[in-house]
């Protein structure tokens, strides 16, 4: 069974995987695409997300569905392409998904700021493979838009070379949410180091000295900086960073349950966790409950809460909310400024998150010793 990453809706992930297989030739033109039921079994989900994934791929021209026979890969020329723009000032914003509350805030801010300047915005919600991202950006560059703001999903060699060409030709673009280390370009991102520094400090102030860290794979500056902020707070408190209490969900060969069990099986187990996002926080809480731990009675949680999980779940915790709306407005302002003033100095913004706590009074003492998995101390 194929595991679905925690930071993307199930149907979006299935759609992305099928699209990638079609674009790289693994599923060639005319090939049969797995059915809703086959995909549901492969990913261990219901048929609803698989049905939605196939419906989207049909609407985008990647597959054709033949009643009684199944779904088949459509001819390449039918695949949806970026539309050409003529007759008005237009910019574009491209995001990985619409479902996340934070992403919607970014887009709203971007749309509001461009509308105020009389510029027409085009919005794309796309999860892209490495090659597909390169083709999308190249197509968008040639579509007639004056500039683009986007999440960089795959900083591969070809895409990096393309962005350098954009720079040399002075084609305006702004990176949103994550940046590229060592690349001097315009970007608007969250101060992720500060966010987890604050979250960790608040747990330290509550008496915790054994604090774990849970994240998805460290494959972009957002997750890397969140780990750095956690380490920075520990160091400031005179505590050493211990890899044994860090779990990276999504690593090949180890399920979330296995990773949480391994961390909690230590003789001196964590009494609190900092979570890089609310997706891993949700999974962590579920696994802790299976092991017999109650949140926040036995373990307290602090998380970067992009999708308002804390409010929806009602679980008391400490949260950091990114300034999504401000990020969208600022990225539009930076992009329009770059369009109007190509030689303007680079604009690079790290926006602060808002940290809140719904936990009760500070604990007097937090000192637990773990002797076996599955039982509270």
Image (tube, rainbow, N blue to C red):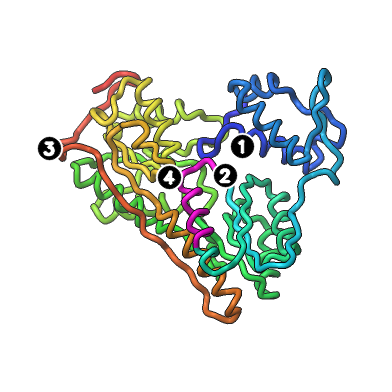
Q: What numbered label is drawn on residue 364?
A: 3
Which of the marked residues, 1 or 2, is nearer the chain's N terminus?
1
Give the prevailing secondary structure in the magenta stretch. helix
Q: Residue 357, relative to residue 313: is it above or below?
A: below
Residue at mark 1:
12
Q: Contact, CB < 8 Å: mark 1 with mark 2?
A: yes
Q: Secondary structure at mark 4?
A: loop
Which of the marked residues, 4 or 2, is nearer the chain's N terminus?
2
How far across and how far down the image is residue 297, in percent?
23, 28
Residue at mark 4:
306
Q: What numbered label is drawn on residue 97?
A: 2
Q: Contact, CB < 8 Å: mark 4 with mark 1?
A: no
How far across and how far down the image is residue 87, in percent?
73, 67
Which of the marked residues, 3 or 4, is nearer the chain's N terminus?
4
Instruction: Tell me what residue is drawn at x 63 percent, y 21 percent.
Output: 47
* For residue 108, side relative to residue 271 (left or right): right
- Classed neighbour count for the residue bearing mark 3: other residues with Cα under 10 Å, few (<14), some (14–19), many (≥20): few
How far across and how far down the image is residue 303, in percent?
36, 42
* For residue 90, side relative to residue 112 (left or right): right
The residue closer to the viewer here, 76 or 67, is 67
Tell me the distance, in whole angstroms, between the alpha carbons under discs 1 and 2. Answer: 8 Å
Instruction: Tell me what residue is drawn at x 19 percent, y 42 percent.
Output: 206
Q: Secondary structure at mark 2?
A: loop
Q: Which residues are magenta?
A: 97-112
Q: Contact, CB < 8 Å: mark 3 with mark 2?
A: no
């Amino acid at each position: 069974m194929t595991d679905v990453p925690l930071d993307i809706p199930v149907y979006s992930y299935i759609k992305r995987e099928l699209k990638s297989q079609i674009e790289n030739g693994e599923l060639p033109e005319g090939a049969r695409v797995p059915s809703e039921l086959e995909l549901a079994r492969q990913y261990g989900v219901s048929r609803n997300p698989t049905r939605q994934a196939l419906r989207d791929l049909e609407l985008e021209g990647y597959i054709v569905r033949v009643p009684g026979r199944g779904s088949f890969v459509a001819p390449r020329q039918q695949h949806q392409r970026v539309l050409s723009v003529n007759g008005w000032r237009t910019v574009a914003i491209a995001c990985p998904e619409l479902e996340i509350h934070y992403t919607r805030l970014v887009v709203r801010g971007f749309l509001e700021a461009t509308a105020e300047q009389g510029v027409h915005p085009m919005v794309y919600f796309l999860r892209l493979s490495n090659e597909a991202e390169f083709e999308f950006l190249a197509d968008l560059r040639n579509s007639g838009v004056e500039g683009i703001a986007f999440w960089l999903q795959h900083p591969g060699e070809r895409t990096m070379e393309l962005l350098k060409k954009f720079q040399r030709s002075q084609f305006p673009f702004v990176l949103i949410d994550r940046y590229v280390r060592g690349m001097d370009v315009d970007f608007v991102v969250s101060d992720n180091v500060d966010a987890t520094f604050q979250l960790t400090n608040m747990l330290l102030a509550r008496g915790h000295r054994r604090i774990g860290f849970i994240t998805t794979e460290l494959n972009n500056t957002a997750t890397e900086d969140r780990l750095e902020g956690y380490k920075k707070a520990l160091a400031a408190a005179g505590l050493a960073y211990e890899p044994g209490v860090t779990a990276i969900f999504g690593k090949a060969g180890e399920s979330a349950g296995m990773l949480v069990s391994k961390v909690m099986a230590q003789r001196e187990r964590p009494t609190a966790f900092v979570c890089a996002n609310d997706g891993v926080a949700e999974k962590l809480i579920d696994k802790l409950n299976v092991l017999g731990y109650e949140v926040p009675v036995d373990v307290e949680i602090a998380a970067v809460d992009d999708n308002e999980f804390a409010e929806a779940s009602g679980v008391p915790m400490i949260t950091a909310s990114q300034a999504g709306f401000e990020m969208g407005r600022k990225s539009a302002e930076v992009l329009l400024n770059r369009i109007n003033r190509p030689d303007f100095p680079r604009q690079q913004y790290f926006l602060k998150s808002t940290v809140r706590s719904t936990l009760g009074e500070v604990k007097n003492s937090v000192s637990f010793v773990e002797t076996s998995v599955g039982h509270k101390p």
